[in-house]
Amino acid sequence: MTVLDARPTQATTDEIEVGPPPPDRSAAGPRGPGGRRGGRRGDTPRRRRHLVRNLAIVLAVVMVPVGWSYAGYLTAPGDAPLQVRSVDWLRDHGFESAINDVEQWWYTRKRPTGSHPPKADIPIALRRTSATVPADADRAVTADRKVTADGSVTADTGVSAAGAAPQRGTLEAVWMPVAGLASGPGAVQETYLHPDAAAPAVIADVVRFDQSKLRTVYVPGTKEPGGTWAWGSEIPMRDRPTVIAAFNAGFKFRHTRGGVYTEGRHAVRPLEAGLASLVIDRSGRADVVAWPGPSALTKDVVSVRQNLDLIVDAGAPAKGLKADRGGRWGTKRSQFQYTWRSAVGVDAQGRLLYAAGSQITLTQLARAMVDAGAVRAMQLDIHDGVVTFNWFRPDPASKLGVSAAKLSPSMQRKATRFLSADWRDFIAVQVR
C-alpha cells in the first residue's frame, strides 16, 4: 500500500519535471511590499511623488506664519513702497547683516561724478539761471576748512554780504524765501550748498526755520517707537491748515542707543546722557544738544528724540567724525556710503536747520550744516526711500486740506507722506 501510494507521487513528480517549464517570473522582478511587483526600481516614481507631496505639506505649514508676517508688513499703514517694506521685513527677520553688506557694496560704488549735481536734486524754486535776489535773501555761510591729523575737519566760518549775487548763474548758497506757506514770507528760507569742492556733483538742500514764528512737534510712528499718541502717527486734519512742513526723524531705535521722551513718558528706553538730541520745549522751540542727563528733563521739556552723537558742535564738524573711534556715529564703513542722508541743527540765532542730500557722505553732510550756519547738528535717518521732507500749503478745495510738494523731486517717498499714519516717527513744523 505504501509502494502503490508512492508510485503516483513519483509519477506526478516526474510529470512536473518533464513537462513544460514554469513561467519565468523573474522578468517581472521580485514582489515588493504589499505584493506589488517591481521592487525598488518600480517604486521610485511613486516614492518620489510621496516625498514631494510631504515636503510641500511641510513647506506650506512652515510658510504660513512667514507669509502672514510678510503680509502684515505689506498691509501696514503708511505709503512705504514694496521695496522699503520688503527690506524692513528682511531686516526684522534675521537678514540684517546680509542687507548691510549689500548696502555697503552698493552705496560705496555710487560715488557721484560729473561737474554738476543732478537737476532733480535741486529744489525747483532754486533752478532759475537768472534771478534777482530779493531784499530779504542773504548769502549762506562759507567756510575755510582744515583737516586735522586725526582726520576730523575744522572750519573758520564767516557770512558773506547779504544780497550778494548768486554764483555760476544759480541760486546756490542764497537763502530764498519759500512762497505760499501758511507761515507767510520770511519765516522759512531754503538754499542748496556744495559741501565738498572735490565733489561738485554732491549737494545738500537746506531749509531754515525762524522759530519765533514757528513751532516744532515730534510725532511718534506706529512702529518707531510704537504706541498710541496724540497725533495718531500722522498730521491730523485739524492741524493741517497750520502745518507747513514735515521731515523724517532718526534711525530705527535698534540701531541707536538713544530713546524718546514725549507726552510725559519714555518710549523704547530711557534717554542716554551724551547722545545727540532734538529737544522741544513747551513753547514749541527746538534745540539740538548733547543730552546732559536726567537733570535736563524738566517740566518745560515736551519731547526729546535721540540719535547717535552730534555731527556738528561749536560751529564745526565734530572732532573725530571721520575716524569714528568707538562707533559714535554708527559703523565706520557706513559713513563713507554715498547715500541719502539728512540732518537737523540750530544756528547762532536759534533758527532750526534741516539738510538732506541724495549721494552724500556723513562728513560732507556735517560740512553742509556748518556752511549753513549750524552751531550744533545731529544726523537723522539715511538711505533710499527713508529721507523725506514735504511742504504743505493750505488748499481748502483738496480732500486732504492741503497741497503737498517735496523739497527736491529726487526724494523717493510721496509728497503726501505723513498725511496718513506712518510706521516711522517724524518732525512737523507748524505756525504759532
Image (spheres, rainbow, N blue to C red):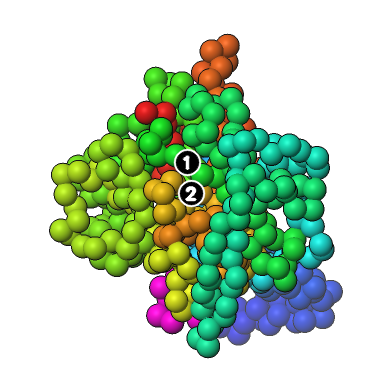
Q: In which quarter of the image is residue 250?
A: bottom left
Compared with 329, 204 (above or below) is above
Q: Residue 110 carries which label?
A: none
**x and y percentages locating residue 88 in the rendered image:** 51, 53
Magenta-tinted stretch: 323-331
Viewer can see residue 103? no
Q: Residue 353 carries which label?
A: 2
Which residue is under mark 1? 209
Q: Residue furthest top?
A: 397
Query: In the rendered view, does 417 fall on the left or right side of 170?
Result: left
Q: Does the magenta stretch include residue 402?
A: no
Q: Quadrant of residue 115?
A: bottom right
Viewer can see residue 301? yes
Identify the secondary structure beneath mark 2.
strand
Q: Residue at 37% x, 28% y: name it.
A: 432
**x and y percentages locating residue 197 in the rendered image:** 70, 68
- Between the residue at mark 1 and the residue at mark 2, the CA separation in whole angstroms equals 6 Å
Identify the secondary structure beneath mark 1.
strand
Q: Does the magenta stretch include residue 327?
A: yes
Compared with 283, 326 (above or below) is below
Query: In the rendered view, does 115 fall on the left or right side of 404?
Result: right
